[in-house]
Amino acid sequence: MKELSKRGEVREKINDALHQDMLLARLSNNDIELLLSSARVFEYSSHEYVFSSGESSEHCFLLLSGEVSLVAPYLESGGFVEMDALKAPRIVGATDFLLQQNRTAHVLTKSDVLALCLPSKSFQELLRRMPMLVYRLCQSMAEMVSALLKKPALPKLKLKVLDQFNPDVMHMIPSPLLIQHQMLPLDLSGNLLKIAFVKEPTKKVLDSLQEVLPGVQPYLYRISERNFQWILQQQGLSSGPSVEASNSPSFSGLPALAAPAPVPAPAPAPAPSAMDTKVAQELLQVLAQQNNAIQQLHVQTQHSLQLQAQQNQAVQVQAQQSQAMHVQLQQALQHQLQSPISVASGASKGMVQV
């Protein structure tokens, strides 16, 4: 990395990048001058870190040229995962200082890169001058990216990455170890090892890799088992004998697994004795007696239910008769109340007049 002056050709690249970036394209000339007054320009070589996970997020960067990788730590077992490839012009590193947290990922150059380093305070001041919607969208995107980086998945091995496959790297790792853990080393540049796995590696697997190649930083990818087996065949490796070799004392330091003992054939069942026959007959008699008792109980239950039904029927008939008598009585009373009252003539004659 080296710092460059913000003049001449570099200044032209800065202006081009500012006008091409979707977020910064509407900056006024005064805002651009404010941005550049505290900004610095750095040139990076290929496979160089712009910043690393865990560092303080005091700056963000505007890529002026080149391409970088967004690399997240693979927390489950160690190693790193390439999340995305970012090309210029692009702002990188703004996520963390928007959330006021340390770096959650690495940014590694994939080629020669020219980047404009922006202090976080100056960049936040520019965001405050923009519409509130843009600022909130930036925060939402930052929170989304931060959530994705917390648990990254192994990226599938692309043909571009597979084109970087270096067969010589395979000879640095014992073939039994490669076959046992189904891992394929692709390329080693400095201490950066690109390696693909059929299944997600555990911490124990990556620790064993560190024992063979101490100090390497593994960049993890996923490869299909079919492609893994095909590459093994192309390199003259066979999974069958190698897996057996991985169980040998020379590789793992553990005793070889003994062949399983033959399973004896089951002994024929003994013929039943006279005592067994007698016990079986007695058991059958007991079961028959219990069956008879159950049938008698069933008959008694049915008889009781029939009696109960007859009683219920008699009660219903009595209730119907009582209801009919009640209706007749009501009708008689209503008839008497509606008929006129007649006065006997004898009674009227016997009245005393005053």
Image: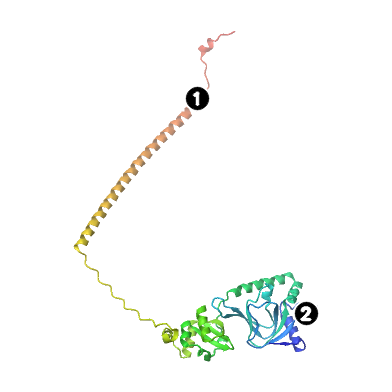
Identify the residue under disc 1: 336
Identify which residue, 272 or 73, lies in the foreground. Answer: 73
Cα distance, mark 1 to mark 2?
Answer: 113 Å
Q: Residue at x 65, y 71 (%)?
A: 143
Where residue 77 sits in the image (x, y, percent)?
Answer: 54, 77
Q: Residues within 10 Å of mark 1 (few under 14, many from 20)?
A: few
Where residue 286 sits in the image (x, y, percent)?
Answer: 25, 54
Q: Toward which corner of the image does residue 189 lie, by quadrant?
A: bottom right
Identify which residue, 217 or 321, lies in the foreground. Answer: 217
Q: Seen from this angle, which residue lies furthest left? A: 274
* 238 left or right, relative to 49: left
Q: Amino acid at mark 1?
A: Gln
Nearest to viewer (mark 1 / mark 2): 2
Q: Amino acid at mark 2?
A: Ile
Secondary structure beneath dot 2 equals: helix
Can you say which quadrant of the picture contains the C terminus? top right
**Colour scheme in use:** rainbow
Can you say which quadrant of the picture contains the N terminus? bottom right
Residue 42 visible (yes or no): yes
Where residue 18 sits in the image (x, y, percent)?
Answer: 74, 81
Identify the residue under disc 2: 32
Residue 223 visible (yes or no): no
* 31 left or right, relative to 322: right
Q: Toward which corner of the image does residue 15 lie, by quadrant?
A: bottom right
Q: Residue at x 27, y 52 (%)?
A: 290
